[in-house]
Image (tube, rainbow, N blue to C red):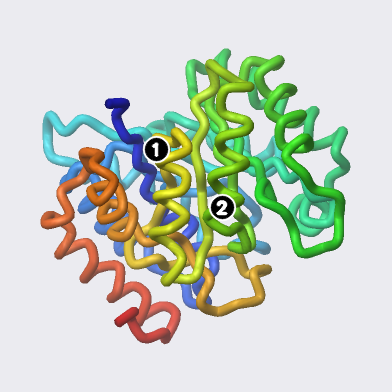
């Protein structure tokens, strides 16, 4: 049975919170993730503080995190998200960041709203990311935003996703994550799309990053798993998500739901759910302190 790669996403969970989370709080949480056994962490982004104030301290967070780890601790994969060349330069200059992530949108509206780029400009940036990360001996993951459709009445279909994957394979991008950015994908659509494209791009590690209402989370994970997916993004307690979803209940898939679903499917979860008690407490504490939002039931 193929092993599961689980990417914990505190960056996505935190970046939209209205109050700034102190650097030391972020460091303590990330350290707890590592000591609990999480090996892949979407930890920071290198973007303008004017637009994402929560990530203004990314360099300091990673530096202090590495300094805080006990001797002989094996550092995990640390993913840093970038949206332009300036962010790339910052990420490459930050020791400890092993993987650069970039959200490539197949929705023109979403691409303009988030990065103010044309399709050609965004593709040129991806090609630059590929060259620069390879030269720096870093990994690269490309997220296909709006992979499961969009609410903007724009053209969408599996052939658009497939075309994007063909291009990424041609430029030798090895890791791609299909993102349900606004949380509208049904389990049937997840199963159909993943099944249709996974063999077409053999050689690419293909994952999923879902946003979802809590009552649909497990179904989406199981649909992807049974279609052959073995790489999953999630965030403890389901905190975060896309502000464009238009539904306050749409957030990241809770990691605890992913682990439950994988166990239900007969897979071996990469993290023991029984080890999450302290992390769940910390995540709920961050939720209530910095968003004034009650913890989930």
Crowding at mark 2 (Cα within 10 Å: few <14, some 14-19, many 20+) = few
- Judged from the image, the secondary structure of the residue bearing numbered disc 2 is helix
Could you say which disc has been placed on residue 225 in the image?
none
Residue toward you, 145 or 148: 148
Foreground mark, 2 or 1, reads 2
In the image, residue 123 lies at what x, y percent?
A: 78, 31
- Of residues 163 and 123, which is closer to you in this image? 163
| Marking on residue 188 | 2
Q: Earlier in the sequence, mark 2 or mark 1?
A: 1
Q: Residues within 10 Å of mark 1 (few under 14, many from 20)?
A: many
- Where is residue 81? Give x, y as percent: 55, 43
**Is any atom of residue 128 visible in this view?**
no
Tell me where residue 61 appears, x and y as whole percent: 38, 50
Instruction: Indicate whether 98 appears above or below 107.
Output: above
43 sits left or right of 210 in the view: left
**Relative to residue 67, is residue 275 drawn left or right?**
left
Could you tell me how far apart the alpha carbons at marks 2 and 1 are, in whole angstroms?
A: 32 Å
Residue at 80 percent of width and 48 percent of height: 156
The residue located at (36%, 49%) in the rendering is 8
- Circle 1 is placed at which residue position? 78
Q: Is mark 1 on a helix, strand or loop?
A: strand
Residue at 82%, 63% (x, y): give it: 152
Q: Which of the two residues, 174 or 263, is positioned nearer the viewer here? A: 263
């Amino acid at each position: 049975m193929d092993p599961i790669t689980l990417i914990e996403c505190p960056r996505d969970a935190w970046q939209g919170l209205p109050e700034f989370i102190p650097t030391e709080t972020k460091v303590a949480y990330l350290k707890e993730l590592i000591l609990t056994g999480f090996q892949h962490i979407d930890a920071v982004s290198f973007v303008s503080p004017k637009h994402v104030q929560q990530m203004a301290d990314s360099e300091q967070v990673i530096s202090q995190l590495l300094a805080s780890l006990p001797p002989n601790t094996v550092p995990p994969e640390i993913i840093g998200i970038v949206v332009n060349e300036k962010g790339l330069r910052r990420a490459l200059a930050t020791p400890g960041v092993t993987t650069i992530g970039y959200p490539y949108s197949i929705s023109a509206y979403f691409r303009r709203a988030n990065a103010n780029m044309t399709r050609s400009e965004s593709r040129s940036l991806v090609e630059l990311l590929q060259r620069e990360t390879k030269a720096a001996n870093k990994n690269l993951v490309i997220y296909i935003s709006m992979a499961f459709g969009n609410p903007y009445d724009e053209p969408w279909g599996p052939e658009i996703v497939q075309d994007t994957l063909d291009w990424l394979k041609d430029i030798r991008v090895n890791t791609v994550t299909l993102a349900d950015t606004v949380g509208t994908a049904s389990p049937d659509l997840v199963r159909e799309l993943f099944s249709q494209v996974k063999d077409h791009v053999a050689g690419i590690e293909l994952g999923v990053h879902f946003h979802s209402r809590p009552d649909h989370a497990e179904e989406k994970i199981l649909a992807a798993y049974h279609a052959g997916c073995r790489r999953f993004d999630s965030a403890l307690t389901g905190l975060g998500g896309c502000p464009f979803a238009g539904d306050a209940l749409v957030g990241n898939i809770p990691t605890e739901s992913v682990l439950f679903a994988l166990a239900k499917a007969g897979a071996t979860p990469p993290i023991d759910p029984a080890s999450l008690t302290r992390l769940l407490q910390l995540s709920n504490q961050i939720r209530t302190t910095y968003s004034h939002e009650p913890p989930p039931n």
